[in-house]
Amino acid sequence: MEAYAVKADRFFLPGRVSGAGYLTVENGRCGRFTRQRPDCRVVDHTGRWVAAGLVDTHIHGFLGYDVLDADSEGVGRVARGLTAHGVTSWLPTILTASVGQMGDACASVAAADDVGGAHVRGIFLEGPFFTERHKGAQNPRYFQDPSVEVFDGWQRRARGLVRKIAIAPERAGSMAFTEALAAQGVHVALAHSDASYEQAMAAVDAGADVFVHTYNGMSPLHHREPGMVGAAMTSRGTYAEVICDGLHVSPTAAEALVRAKGTDHTVLVTDCLRCGGMPDGDYYLGEFPIVVRDGVAHLRDGGNLAGSTLTLDQAVRNVVDWNVATAEQALRMASEVPARSSGLADVCGSLRPGLDADFVVLDRDLTVEETYVSGSRVYQRGE
């Protein structure tokens, strides 16, 4: 690939925000930032901002496809569709199902080579080691105690792609499981659980480092029993996901979490389902029928919220509009921070020299104008 430089009014660099200048790109990787025009072709984005491509570490599907479908072509459709929203890396997320069905989904992601669009950076297994009290839209029929043997079977079928798995820390064997997976370099997350504060913190001590969609699907904060929400807010060095669609979590609750964790440990995620990017209507989440009305997904039976139709660029705009974070903080919460939370900071999440040249061109209102993956433009607004 020919070397070139991107010119823009503002760059969100690894350690700072810079004014006008040039970011060089060579062989699909980020080069140095300079204020002087380099001796190469220049792609002019005067009047716009350039930031690292967004990284969605919790997303089940998009545009009618779900990772649980075990359809490699569907994985590619999602990967390509996400680029319109500035996403350049994602973790296909598999929800609770039978051991065999989850294994099939793992294998389909591993087989989805050269799909185009956003990089598939690994797999997130959201289940099945949960408890029923805060099951959300997960199917309790398949809940079980954590098993390293079962996980190893999934990992073999995934060809080593599983980067993160969520568990309820009160289940039998969860501490030994957490220790074993942390030793393998797999991130253990806490979710869909009625654990006490002490149980959640014991899991953190054992190596768990992520709280899944904080507030949702977990024991709440109470002044005499802080619960898992309290553990998410107070544990040092851990990361707290949050779905900032204004439905799963109120703007005030989002602000409370950000104040407790800091923007450097709060991860914007979508938890988006197959109905993301699709019209209102009837869909399925695993074996459960869901209904989307006015862009909001509910279980047909019971009416509980079931994931979201949120896109990550909208989450960024939301937290800025809510005055929860600045544009710089919000963009980092959707790129650099999720990359760190899933062990991806060495390949994506920032405009650091040597990393994949995955970046997004934004208007001043944070609208995605263009998206680049490995230095190649894969999306342009209006085309």
Image: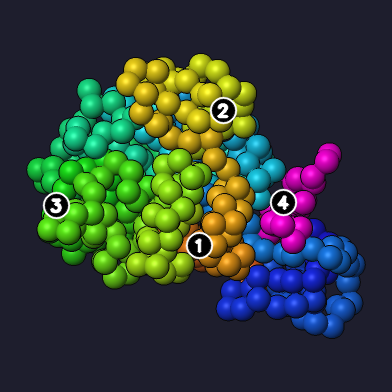
Residue 303: give x, y in percent of width and height. Answer: 37, 24
Identify the secondary structure beneath mark 3: loop
Lower position in the chain sequence, tag 2 or tag 1: 2
- Measure how far apart labels 4 and 3 are at the Cα level: 41 Å
Q: Which residue corresponds to mark 1? A: 324
At label 2, which amino acid type do we have?
Answer: Asp
- Asked whether 171 or 32 is in front, the reply is 171
Lower position in the chain sequence, tag 1 or tag 3: 3
Q: Which residue corresponds to mark 4? A: 368
Asked if marks 4 and 1 touch (Cβ < 8 Å), the reply is no
Task: Say which quadrant the C terminus sits in.
Answer: top right
Rendered image: mark on residue 196: 3
- Measure how far apart labels 4 and 1 are at the Cα level: 20 Å
Q: Is residue 333 above or below residue 143?
A: below
Q: Is residue 136 above or below residue 87?
A: above
At 53% from the left and 35% from the top, the residue drawn is 309
Q: Could you tell me what secondary structure mostly forms the magenta stretch?
A: strand
Identify the secondary structure beneath mark 1: loop
At label 4, which amino acid type do we have?
Answer: Val
